[in-house]
Image (cartoon, rainbow, N blue to C red):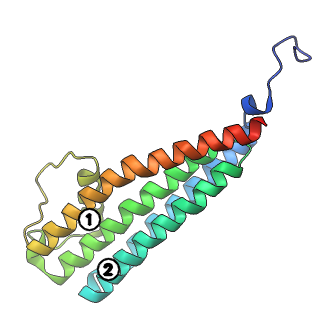
Amino acid sequence: MTGPDGTPARGPAEARPSSGRIAWTILRVTASVVALVTLYYVLPLNHCSVPAALTMLLIGLAGFVALVAVQVRWIIRSPFPMLRAVEALATSVPFFLLLFAATYVVLAGLSADSFGGPLTHTDGLYFTVTVFSTVGFGDITARTQPARNLVTGQMITDLVVLGLAVKVIVGAVDRGRSRTSR
């Protein structure tokens, strides 16, 4: 079957999002990431206690899991699951990275020996991204046992995020595509 212009007609599974929908998605992602980064930079992270830092990290990780769960449901229900999946990754990964960056800044503020000196918000974010990307330049290193434990925890969690979360999101795209093709 062909469309009005002589090209093959697309079924629901092959429908493409409009440029307006794509622009709206880019705007939402950009606004979300800007809001997260702004919040990260304005929070007085170097004035927290150990219990506050651990609570922040645990609640943040629970929030990350909840965010991914909600996004999976949105992907499955979306008429454009791939677009929604890109949006999910583009908002979840910065949230995850900023959570660890904030924890590193707090830990460095509690003990200057944790990383060989205090970390600014930018230093914390830089260190988190180097750990996440497995680059590890060595200019900032974890020096105390709590800092090393936290970095090890991030490394393990990074593997889970890269493996499990991506697998779950890709599975949601497949389910969403099969739902829209019916």
Evaluate if marks 2 and 1 touch, with contact meaning CB atoms under 8 Å apart.
Answer: yes
Q: What percent of the width, then of the height, locates residue 64?
A: 46, 66
Q: Which element is circle 2 on?
A: helix
Q: Distance between the residues labelled 2 and 1?
A: 11 Å
Q: Residue furthest top?
A: 6
Check the image and report above or below for 98 versus 86.
below
- Three-letter code, disc 2: Leu
Query: Quadrant location of the N terminus?
Result: top right
Where is mark 1, residue-wise? 124
The crowd level at tag 1 (other Cα within 10 Å; few <14, some 14-19, many 20+) is many
Q: In which quarter of the image is the C terminus?
A: top right
Q: In this view, does 139 lie above or below 153?
A: above
Q: Which of marks 2 and 1 is nearer the N terminus?
A: 2
Residue visible at 37% across and 79% down? Answer: 56
61 relative to 31, above or below: below
Label 2, on which residue?
45
Answer yes or no: is residue 66 visible: yes
Residue 146 lies, in percent from the top left, at: 14, 74
What x and y, as percent, mark residue 174?
A: 61, 39
Q: Determine the image quadrant of residue 160.
A: bottom left
Identified by mark 1, the residue type is Gly
Left or right of 142 on screen, residue 70: right
> Which residue is depicted at the point 20% across and 70% down?
119
